Every structure is written in C-alpha cells, then in structure tokens.
Image: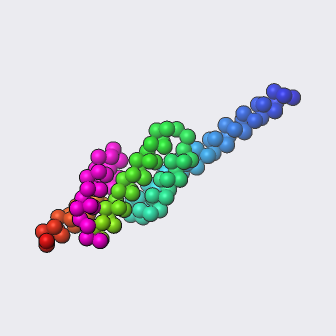
Amino acid sequence: MKNFFLSLCILLSVFLTGCFSDEGMETLNKGKKYLKEDNYVEALESFAIASNRLKKQDDKDIAKGLWHVTNGYIRAKKFCVSGEYEEAEKIILETEKSEFYEYTKDDLEVLKQEIIKNSKKD
C-alpha cells in the first residue's frame, strides 16, 4: 500500500509539473504573438509570467530576454514621446546588445529614424 501511494504521488507530481510547464510555454508563445501585434504591454506581462512558470532554464532565459527587449522598446518609446532623444538612443543601443534584439528590431529602427529626424530639427 505504501508503494502504491508513493507511486501515485510521483505520478501526480510529474503530471502537475508537466501541465505547469506547458502553461509557461503557452504564455511565452502568447507573448510572442502580442509582440508581433505591437501589443507591448501585454507581451511584457506574458514574458514575466512565463519566466516564472517555465521549468527549463533555457526557456526561462528566453522569456527573460524577450522581456528585456520589450521593456527596452517601451522605455525608448517613452523617451522619444517626451522628446528625450539622447536617453532613448542609449536604451536602444543597450537593447541592441541582446541576443533577442531581432524580435523588436523593426520597431527600434523606426524609433532610431524618429531620433535622427528630430535631432536634425535642433
């Protein structure tokens, strides 16, 4: 009876761990979808949740990297809107160093063009 109970507990824990990890991957993929749709706030939230739910370190690192570049874009955009182009440029340069830069590359290029255009006005 003891072995049966122990086996049942092990199976249950493996099942729950698998479900939780799948949920993390689902959340990570949802975040990528939001990123493609330019829904940065939702993407940022999804990546933060996914990094906590995922079990494998590589998957956690991907979620954290995507969070980093998404956050960089949001911060750079905020500085562009407020006219602080030097700060925005610093953030863009920092974000470009990330291996996940490709996910926000096009949007960051648009911000760079905005910075260049507005720098010429000054």
- Can residue 85 be seen here? The reply is yes
Which residue is outermost to the top? 3
Vertical placement of residue 2 versus 16, above or below: above
> In the figure, is residue 2 to the left or right of 87?
right
Does the magenta segment cover residue 103?
yes
**Image coords of residue 42 (percent x, y):** 47, 62
Specify how the rendered protein is coloured: rainbow
Does the magenta segment cover residue 75?
no
**Viewport quadrant of the N terminus:** top right
Vertical placement of residue 78 versus 65, above or below: below
- The dominant secondary structure in magenta is helix
Identified at 81% across, 27% down, the residue is 3
**Image coords of residue 51 (percent x, y):** 51, 48
**Viewport quadrant of the C terminus:** bottom left
Vertical placement of residue 13 versus 32, above or below: above
- Can residue 110 be seen here? The reply is no
Q: Nearer the viewer, residue 101 or 92?
A: 92
> In the figure, is residue 50 to the left or right of 35?
right
> In the figure, is residue 7 to the left or right of 39?
right
Numbered-mark total: 0
Q: Quadrant of residue 99?
A: top left
**Image coords of residue 49 (percent x, y):** 53, 53
Identified at 67% across, 37% down, the residue is 14
> In the figure, is residue 26 to the left or right of 122?
right
Q: Magenta residues, as a range?
A: 82-106
Identified at 27% across, 61% down, the residue is 88
Q: Quadrant of residue 35?
A: bottom left
**Image coords of residue 60 (percent x, y):** 48, 43
Identified at 24% across, 59% down, the residue is 89
